[in-house]
Image (cartoon, helix red, strand yellow):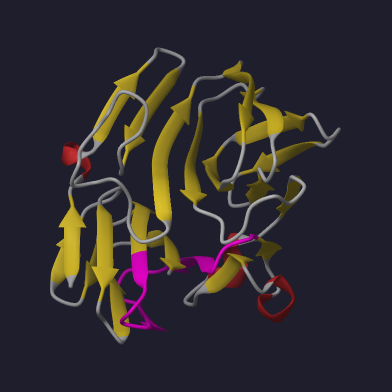
Amino acid sequence: MIEVRPFATLGHADHGWLDARHHFSFANYHDPERMGWGRIRVWNDDTIAAQSGFPPHPHRDMEIVTFVRRGAISHQDSLGNAGRTAAGDVQVMSAGTGIVHSEYNLEGEATTLFQIWILPDRSGEAPAWDQREFPRGDRSGRWVIVASSDPDADDALPIRCDAKVLAATLKAGETVTYSADPTRHQYLVAPTGRIRVSDREAQPRDGIAVTGETEITLEALDDAEIVMVDAR
């Protein structure tokens, strides 16, 4: 099953400093048909105005992956961690038993990012945060795993759930395939560029929900960047 979810059908909240699109029910957007996809609970497509952001707020029992597309996000948390994650790079936060953090765009331009929440496989563990650079050139024409439940084997950031977060960049006309377990759930978005998944064409920022497939073949109709989560 491959379902394209057009960008225009996503939930929308414009707070002035934050323009957010919700692939799944979140905050004041509620759609009983879009409560998540497998263990994926949230996929927000956020544009954060310059010199603004999220003040300190708490999380618990959630794996939160932030994929920065343009600009940068600056993080601070109650564990004493602080860092700046720039375009093309990734940060992960295992909220565990509880963490308070802030995320600000301290840049002179708008920052765009995906914030992806995945339900953890276990609870009761101490919270943690990490970040890493993932140069776009390293994923040219191929999938690169950026976060994984098996970070050592996948050379990726650690998350505490049976999932992988992957990214690829393709030139127009290039294809990339992914060997999938049909019992799992895949969700992917191309923030830039039109793509085709099997016979389904998707516009930039459309969501594509996949399950029941053994192989996912993706073709770039334009130069494109793709982010995908494969989860139980």
User: Residue pushed farthest left?
Assistant: 199
Question: Position of 191 compared to 58: left or right?
Answer: left
Question: Which x, y percent locates residue 225?
Answer: 42, 59
Question: Which image quadrant is residue 197 in?
Answer: bottom left
Where is 217 relative to 145, above or below?
below
Q: Position of residue 85 (x, y in %)?
A: 68, 42
Badge count: 0
Q: Does residue 54 appear to the left or right of 152 in the view shown?
A: left
Residue at 76%, 29% (x, y): give it.
76
Picture quarter with the C terminus: bottom left
Which is more toward the observer, 128 or 167? 128
Q: Which residues are magenta?
A: 159-186
* Residue 188 position in % (x across, y down): 35, 61
Question: Is residue 179 one of those drawn in magenta?
Answer: yes
Q: Check residue 130 for magenta coloring.
A: no
* Whether residue 67 is situated above or below residue 136 in the rendered picture: above
- Answer above or below: position of 124 versus 19: below
Which residue is farthest top? 16
Nearest the viewer among 119 and 49 is 119
Q: Which quadrant: the N terminus?
A: bottom left
Inspect this view and state whether residue 221 appears.
Answer: no
Q: Quadrant of residue 193?
A: bottom left
Residue 2 shows in this picture = yes
Query: With respect to residue 89, does 73 lie above or below?
Result: above
Quarter residue 196 falls in: bottom left
Q: Position of residue 215 (x, y in %)?
A: 31, 85
Residue situated furthest right in the rendering: 80
**Residue located at (23% from left, 38% from top):** 10
In this view, the residue in front, 53 or 109, is: 53
